Amino acid sequence: PVSMALFIGRRYCSKMPLASQHQRFCCVGTGASNQPPESLKEAEALAPDQVETLRCHYMSSSCSISYKNTGGLQITGGRGSRLIDVYGNEYLDTRNNVAHCGHGHPEIVEAITYQMKLLNTNSRYLHPNASLLSQKLANLFPSSNRGDADYSLTKVFFVNSGSEANDLALRLARAYNKKQQNNVHVQKDKQPKQCIITIDHAYHGHTLATLDVSPYKHHQGTEITECPAYVKRVPYPDMYRGVHSNCKD
């Protein structure tokens, strides 16, 4: 299969010691010191084979390593849209789902560094950053008016990951549906059955709730052997090879 991380054929300072290469690439454009803090020096001194040995021994094999069949990449730095390995090779990053604004973005690095020096806590306390960000996000939401009812999105939840966001979305949908059923005077045995529609082969997270609606796991047949009864799969809109590829409409 074609590799998703494209090697672009650039090598820097091939004779430079590994630790020095790491320091050079990790700190480009961030204004940070080239010297790692004392707490990271032990990790910085590990050779690549030691890194892989420790990983395989102490981390679960279910946490897969990309390109393990050709030798896992030891990525030690990033800059913009590029990943940089321990040897100084650059790769075009087409897989990362963490650095949405690129690696080492100077404004983001500066803001995170500033805030971490002041405070890192949960949302149970009042804080101007959280309140203002809530307003800015809400202002981006589309409005939706249906007759006399206003269904516009106006509230914000801060979460730690996409899995947590999707898990919370399922909880909110179930809570809303339950509230609506309680407001309607219909016999319980005649109430419509609840179901969740998901696109086939989709992935929505690794919590138990999101795995239920992630058909890629249904096809694997390891953790979830079949699609739950309340989940309805629909084909993804592939107009080239999909089930509707011959439809003129």
Image: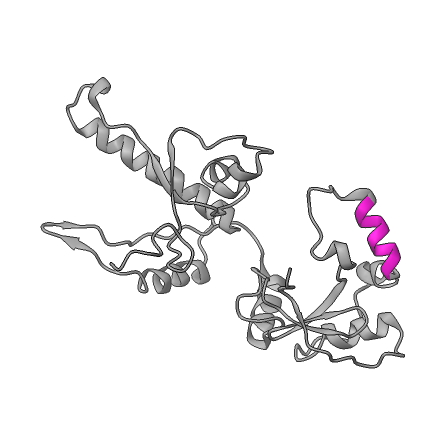
View extreme (left): residue: 147
Q: Residue at x 90, y 79 (%)?
A: 15
58 relative to 230, above or below: below
Image location (x, y in percent) of residue 34: 78, 75
Residue found farthest to the front: 246
Left-right relation of 127 to 85 = left
The segment highlighted magenta reads 48-56
Up-down relation of residue 181 to residue 154 (above or below): above
Q: Is residue 227 magenta?
A: no
> Is 159 in front, or is 4?
4
- Closer to the camera, 75 or 44? 75
Which residue is found at the position 60% from the left and 34% from the top?
222
Picture mark count: 0
44 relative to 220, above or below: below
Task: State the quadrant of the N terminus.
Answer: bottom right
Please state which of residues 168 and 157 is positioned toward the viewer in this rendering: 168
The percent position of residue 98, horizontal first and vertical second, equals 57, 60
The answer to whether residue 34 is left or right of residue 8 is right
Q: How is the image coloured?
A: one colour
Q: Is residue 127 left or right of residue 149?
A: right
Relative image position of residue 117 (x, y in whole percent): 63, 64
Q: Relative to the observer, which residue lies in front, 40 or 203?
A: 203
Q: Main secondary structure of the magenta part?
A: helix
Looking at the rendering, which quadrant does residue 232 occupy?
Answer: top left
Residue 120 percent coordinates (x, y)? 58, 56
**Quarter of the figure that contains the C terminus:** bottom left
